[in-house]
Structure formats: structure tokens, C-alpha cells
């Protein structure tokens, strides 16, 4: 279950002024964002980057926020866009929620014990086919992740969403037959066969000639003259 520890994240209202304003905020150590849902109009805001980073590191998916020091409200961290290289947050989306109303959310699947499974011990490769699962739950019941032990998985074995056990108060919304993990046999590297090849020398008429005839031909002789020189060399 998600952490019940809740510290309030202070937000500052801002006008939706476009990408230039967003870049200016980031230079000032702020992260732009938008909060929506709950029957109210979308609220654009800015939040201190360091405070946001610390909150995301220790909080669950639902946090408390205030805007310009006003009354606090509960929000779901809907999306965090990150810089592709530095990994820092560059924009955050928050969804207003009521703690007594179930909502849909996405949570990660966490597998444990894959390195100890018979399949991996025998050289197989563990593949996580599904990273996240869609759920329905009260905001306070949304887990940080859904954990499943795969320490008994064998080579060529496949598991589907049906094996997951949802925490109390959580309903899985995806198709139970969705494949979530497999262990595949190790990939065998192709063995290159050594093939002996012999390059034949051919004359102008396409017929094979020996090395001495080829050398004579390279000196400007015709194929016939080259063959005669080669024959003379053999007789001597």
C-alpha cells in the first residue's frame, strides 16, 4: 500500500505563458506543471525543483498540495516528464482526487527472485513483458507497485496477469491473459564453418591456366603465347 506519510507540497500559481516562460522557470530552479480534475478549472503552477524531487522520492502516488499557501488538497501524481539526458523533472501533471472516491491509476509491476529462478540458473533469460498495470482503487489504497515472486520460473515458462495478487481494495483492470513475463532459452551463437576455397586462374578464353602462364599473360602476351612460354619452361 502507498505510504501514509504525507507532507504538503507548496505550489505557486502561474499563468500559462508558453514554452518561453517554462524555460525561464527552469533556469530559476522551478518546475512548471498543471493540476486538473475534480470539477475545477485547470490550475497552472510552478514548484521548487528540489522540493519536488524530495517529495517524489519519499511520497506515494497521492500527495497533499497547497497553492500560494491556501487550503490543502489531495492530488495524484499523474505524469512527470523528465529531461532525456539529465533525468530531472521538467514538467509535472497532477490530478485532483477525493479520498473517498475510487479512481483509475497505473502502477509498476515489480518482480523479485528472477536471478534465483531455475530458468535463469540454467542460462535462460528473464524478460519482463509488461512494466505497468492499470488498477482501480481509492486514492489511499493505491500501491507503490504490485510485487510478484518469480523465483520458481523455469525455462520456456510464461506467466500472465492472472498470477498477480492485487492488494486489498485494488482491482486489476487489464486482461488476465496478458503476458507479463517469460524465461527464454539462451541464444546460441551460430558456428561459422571454415570453407576452403581455391581461386583458379583463367585465361582470356575462360580456360584455367597455371601460375607461370598467368605471369606471362600479365606481361602483355596473349593467352596462346603465354601457354607456349609455359610449355617451353616445362620442357627446359
Image: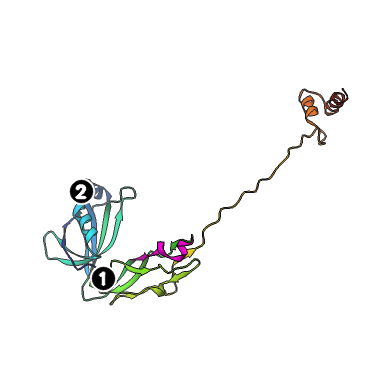
Kindly indicate the quadrant of the structure image that contains residue 45: bottom left
Q: Position of residue 89 (x, y in %)?
A: 27, 53
SS state under label 1 = loop
Q: Which of marks 1 and 2 is in front?
A: 1
Q: Residue 48 carries which label?
A: none
Identify the residue position indicated by label 1 in the image: 1
Q: Which quarter shows the N terminus?
A: bottom left
SS state under label 2 = loop
Q: Which of marks 1 and 2 is nearer the N terminus?
A: 1
> Which one is in front, 13 or 231?
231
In magenta stretch: residue 149: no
Q: Position of residue 160 (x, y in %)?
A: 43, 71
Identify the residue position indicated by label 2 in the image: 29
Q: What colour scheme has been applied to the protein in the rendered image?
A: rainbow
**Residue in view at x 14 percent, y 65 percent:** 72
Kindly indicate the quadrant of the structure image that contains residue 76: bottom left
Q: In this view, does 184 lie to the left or right of 23?
A: right
**Residue in view at x 33 percent, y 72 percent:** 135
Q: Position of residue 18 (x, y in %)?
A: 26, 52
Dot 1 surroundings within 10 Å: few (below 14), some, or many (20 or more)?
some
User: What span is in magenta?
Assistant: 108-122
> Which one is in front, 129 or 138?
129
Where is 39 relative to 194, above or below?
Answer: below
Give me the C-alpha separation between circle 1 and circle 2: 32 Å
Q: Where is residue 20 in the image (x, y as percent from the top left)?
A: 26, 47
Disc 1 and disc 2 in contact, CB within 8 angstroms: no
Kindly indicate the quadrant of the structure image that contains residue 132: bottom left
Amino acid at each position: 500500500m502507498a505510504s501514509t506519510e504525507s507532507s504538503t507540497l507548496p505550489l505557486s500559481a502561474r499563468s500559462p505563458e508558453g514554452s518561453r516562460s517554462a524555460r525561464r522557470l527552469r533556469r530559476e530552479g522551478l518546475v512548471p506543471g498543471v493540476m486538473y480534475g475534480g470539477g475545477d478549472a485547470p490550475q497552472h503552477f510552478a514548484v521548487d525543483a528540489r522540493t519536488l524531487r524530495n517529495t517524489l522520492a519519499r511520497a506515494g502516488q497521492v500527495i497533499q498540495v497547497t497553492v500560494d499557501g491556501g487550503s490543502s488538497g489531495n492530488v495524484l501524481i499523474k505524469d512527470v516528464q523528465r529531461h532525456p539526458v539529465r533525468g530531472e523533472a521538467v514538467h509535472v501533471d497532477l490530478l485532483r482526487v477525493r479520498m473517498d472516491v475510487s479512481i483509475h491509476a497505473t502502477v509498476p509491476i515489480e518482480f523479485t527472485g528472477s536471478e534465483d529462478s531455475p530458468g535463469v540458473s540454467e542460462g535462460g533469460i528473464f524478460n519482463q513483458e509488461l512494466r505497468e498495470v492499470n488498477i482501480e482503487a481509492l486514492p489511499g489504497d493505491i500501491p507503490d507497485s504490485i510485487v510478484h515472486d518469480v523465483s520458481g520460473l523455469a525455462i520456456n515458462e510464461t506467466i500472465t496477469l492472472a498470477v498477480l495478487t492485487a492488494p486489498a481494495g485494488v482491482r486489476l483492470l487489464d486482461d488476465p491473459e496478458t503476458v507479463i513475463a517469460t524465461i527464454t532459452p539462451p541464444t546460441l551463437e551460430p558456428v561459422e564453418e571454415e570453407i576452403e576455397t581455391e581461386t583458379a586462374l583463367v585465361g582470356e578464353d575462360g580456360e584455367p591456366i597455371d601460375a607461370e602462364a598467368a605471369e606471362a599473360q600479365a606481361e602483355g602476351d596473349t593467352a596462346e603465347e603465354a601457354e607456349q612460354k609455359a610449355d617451353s619452361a616445362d620442357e627446359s
